[in-house]
Each structure stands twice: as structure tokens, then as C-alpha cells.
Image (cartoon, helix red, strand yellow):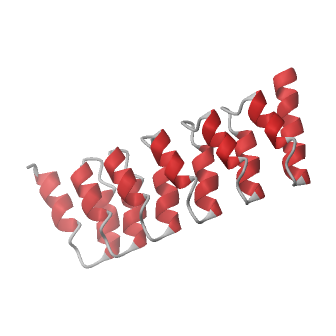
Amino acid sequence: MTENDVSIDISLDDKDWRVRVAAIRHPNATSEDIDKALNDEYWNVRETAIRHPNATKENIDKALNDEYWYVREAAIQHPNATKEHIDKALNDEYWNVRETAIRHPNATKEHIDKALEDKDWRVRITAIRNPNATKENIDKALDDENDLVIEKAKVKLNSFNS
């Protein structure tokens, strides 16, 4: 254990949440440090932890179960988020998390299909805008009940035709 590792671990136990946030931002923070920070009582420590580049798939799994939607939203933004993480986030109760999930570059045609059935029009529009959206996805969006979704689908369809 290096001196940095010891100071991160000690700082994660500090009474001041701001010290814990600073500690988990350290570039040498490990997945174990991140896991520890994901157990913190303060959501902002947990959110900062899951944004760390060293967060693992297991850390993301844990953060996607957090009680606060903004921690779950931060988790699904992580570059290490998998297709399974996107599946889970697309079932979140908060539209913000679902919308962020469908923005992920790892979202598949199947994820986009699912998002196009979302009850919230903002999620459906974001699905259309995903670079992985296929012509088949856009054709489906053209039958949406919301005029704005249909309009965005027409614009996207034009990009396929040009």
C-alpha cells in the first residue's frame, strides 16, 4: 500500500463530506475505494465516486441501485457501462435516468426500440437522436403519438436519405 493509497483510505473516513469527495477524485483511487465511497451517506460522495475513471462494472452495478436518481444517472454515463447496465437503466422509474441511458454510445438498436416505447416523449426523442438509431427505429418513431417525436423522426429520416 502506497502513501497515496493510505491517505485516500483515511480521507474516505473523514467526517467532512467535502474531504471524502476530494479523496475519491484522486487519480489513484481504486475500485475498492470507489466501492467504499458508494456506501457513503452523502449522495454527492457517491455521485463523485461513480464518475471516477477507475470505476468498474461492479461499481456501476452498485451505483445503479442507489436510492438517488442522480447517482444512477451518473452511473449510466460511465464509459464502462455495459449493454446490461443500459437495460437496467431503461427500466428506471425516473425519465432522466432512462433518457441518459439511451444517450450512451453502447446503446443498441434493441435499446432504442425499447426507448421508443417509453411513456416519456423526451426519452423517445433522445432515442431518435442516438447515432446508433437505424432506419427501422426511425420508421417506428414516425408512428408516435407525439407530434414533436414524429417531427424529430422525419428530420432523422432525411439524414438517412441524404
Q: Give the residue at x 27% y 58%.
A: 35
Counting from the top left corner in percent of width and height, residue 30 is at: 24, 49
Q: Residue furthest top?
A: 162
**Mark count:** 0
Q: Is residue 78 left or right of residue 123?
A: left
Q: Is residue 41 left or right of residue 3?
A: right
Q: Is residue 55 visible?
A: no
Image-based side of 41 in relation to 11, left or right = right
In percent of the image, x 47 and y 47: which residue is there? 85
Foreground: 52 or 80?
Answer: 80
Residue 72 horizontal side relative to residue 38, left or right: right
Q: Residue 17, located in which quarter of the rendered image?
A: bottom left
The answer to whether residue 59 is above or below residue 19 is above
The percent position of residue 131, horizontal first and vertical second, equals: 68, 33
Q: Quadrant of the C terminus?
A: top right
When the figure is inspected, residue 8 is found, relative to residue 113, above or below; the finding is below
Q: Nearer the viewer, residue 14 or 147?
A: 147
Q: Is 90 drawn above or below residue 16 in the view shown?
A: above
State the image coordinates of residue 58 (x, y, percent, origin top left).
Answer: 32, 49
Instruction: Report the residue at 66% width, 32% height from top.
Output: 132
Residue that extends furthest to the bottom in the rendered view of this protein:
15
Look at the image and tell me whether residue 102 can be seen: yes
Can you give x and y, in whole percent of width and height, for residue 76 in the image? 50, 51
Residue 106, by quadrant, is top right
Extreme residue toward the left, this view = 1
The residue depicted at 68 percent of the width and 38 percent of the height is: 130
